[in-house]
Amino acid sequence: MNRREFAKQFGLSTAALTLTGTQKLWSEPTRKAKPNIVVILSDDVGYGDLSCYGGINIATPNIDALAQQGVRFTDAHADAATCTPSRYAMLTGQYAWRRDGIQVLPGDAKSLIEPGRATIASVLKSAGYATGLVGKWHLGLGEGAIDWNGRIAPGPCEVGFDDAFYFAATADRVPTVYIHNHTVVNLDPADPITVSYSRKVGDEPTGHDDPELLKMKLSEGHDGTIVDGISRIGFMTGGKAARWTDETMAKTFTDKACEFIQAHKDHPFLLYFTPSDIHVPHAPAAQFADKSECGIRCDTILQLDDCVGRVMQTLKEHNLLEDTLVLFTSDNGPVVNDGYNDNSVATLGAHRPAGQWRGGKYSVYEGGTRVPLITCWQGRIGHGVSNALVSQVDLLRSLASLVDARVPAGQAQDSQDELPVLLGRSQRGRESLIEEALFLSVRTDRWKLVDRRQRPGEHPGPAWKAPTPESMRVAKAQEDRFMPGSVDYPEAEIELYDILVDPGETHNVAAQHPEIVAKLRGLIAAARRAS
């Protein structure tokens, strides 16, 4: 699709005004009929973690520059309050709760996305794009037991990526190695890798048995094999030459992302850049350590911001800024203490990772899924703030629409074409979206409903039972991990909140609005019938 066809499709002129009324959608001349696309998916970054979203005691100038030059969304959502399901939904355009068993995966899990299922990568590849993944994957690998010393497949390359440099799960899980396409990087055949999540393998020290060897103490779990002075979830032995160093991980991934851009600068490309930051363990490089006002967790935010700046600088050096749509977002809400005693809670100070929203990672409340989303396309879209209700699940069809790519029939069933919204051409977003944590919830532009009988998976959960005082205490303590001093955990089966007047979700008004409750519960029922 050339620029005039694009403008005609969306009812625009090539001199169309944007949010601010000062920028053109397209400028002359353009070198490419199809733009490059860079999706930057950060990890555990909350709504309040960036200075452009009102973050306290934190400065993120490179991410702020994207917001100043593009569109900053205030009501954008991940599909889930944890990473594996939200990443699945974003890549496939299908709500993760439709499938049983999509939870936070161990590092040796089977591949979740079966070859043949449409992804953002496969759809853009069919439209002639070079497609690259750099960073965290965490969507499973292989078809069962993984041979880490041989060819690892299926994986990213089987679901649309031409080139993939990644690690299997998270930085706090084994195996602590990089993988390039199908092979562990720097693997020594004489030192084979063995991984287990059920029992200790080999004789290497663990956080449980040898805590005196740790450079970062643990607070809960994370007591498996020690790598780089940090104990992980799970056990591994071997592969010593292939193991990463945590303090250089951000640079390693960003180097690879910039290399991909340089290699494909003359051809339309998709870069799916998924930094590990700011997920635990928080181990920033020396240049960022002790540099923030809100502790080590915020040091990693500074590091993430620098990585974004390096990617944008690379685009600039190759004169690609006007040819590239950049999207920055996060896979779920924030968490402060997530398994390591790194003093991140004590040093947080006035910084509020979720901003004004209740909850965070793992939580059914707004802070669990309301995430930063910024779209930037220099000289092509204007700059401003959008309050439209948007979901990451819509990226697949929206990007397909942008490049005139075909989405296979029967695929991406939950993805909607929201391209005019993402480009700042419309403030009319979704009418509703369904999200997941331990339970399902529904959001409209005004209302938020939580239904504790509805659990992720193919079928609704068991009949609701009133929580015990102990379960409420545990739930409250869990929520305090991401928003210290949170309100009491409710005892109700159904919760309804008026987000416009009660953004902190403190007053359950389900009893006062039974008609709204019935309507929103009906949306969940209709979505389940459409599975």
Image: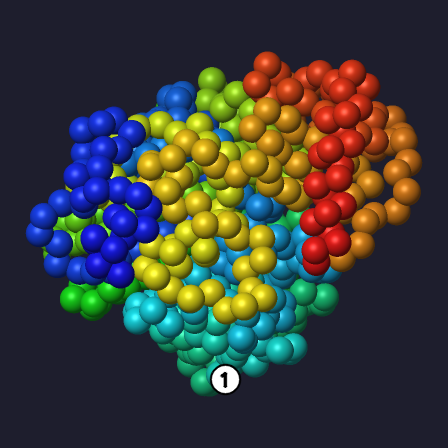
Q: Quadrant of residue 65?
A: top left
Percent of width and height locating residue 46: 48, 34
Percent of width and height locating residue 141: 56, 71
Q: Nearer the viewer, residue 519 or 193?
A: 519
Task: Judge left or right: residue 418 versus residue 198.
Answer: left
Q: Is residue 520 visible?
A: yes
The residue tagged 1 is 150
Q: Is residue 426 above or below residue 314?
A: above
Q: Secondary structure at mark 1?
A: loop
Pick the quarter of the image with the C terminus. bottom right
Q: Quadrant of residue 477?
A: top right
Rendered image coloring scheme:
rainbow
Percent of width and height locating residue 362: 64, 40
Pick the quarter of the image with the N terminus. bottom left
Amino acid beneath label 1:
Gly
Q: Looking at the image, which residue is at 52% across and 79% down?
A: 153
Q: Looking at the image, which residue is at 88% across and 47% down?
A: 462
Q: Nearer the viewer, residue 99 or 29?
A: 29
Crowd tier of the residue under label 1, counting other residues whose Cα lies within 10 Å: few below 14, some 14–19, many 20 or above: some
Q: Looking at the image, which residue is at 28% across and 36% down?
A: 70
Percent of width and height locating residue 318: 12, 56
Q: Looking at the image, which residue is at 50% across and 50% down?
A: 416
Looking at the rendered structure, the number of numbered marks drawn on it comes to 1
Task: Judge left or right: residue 105 versus residue 461.
Answer: left
Q: Is residue 155 above or below residue 76?
A: below
Q: Is residue 174 visible?
A: no
Q: Nearer the viewer, residue 101 or 124?
A: 124
Task: Judge left or right: residue 430 versus residue 518.
Answer: left
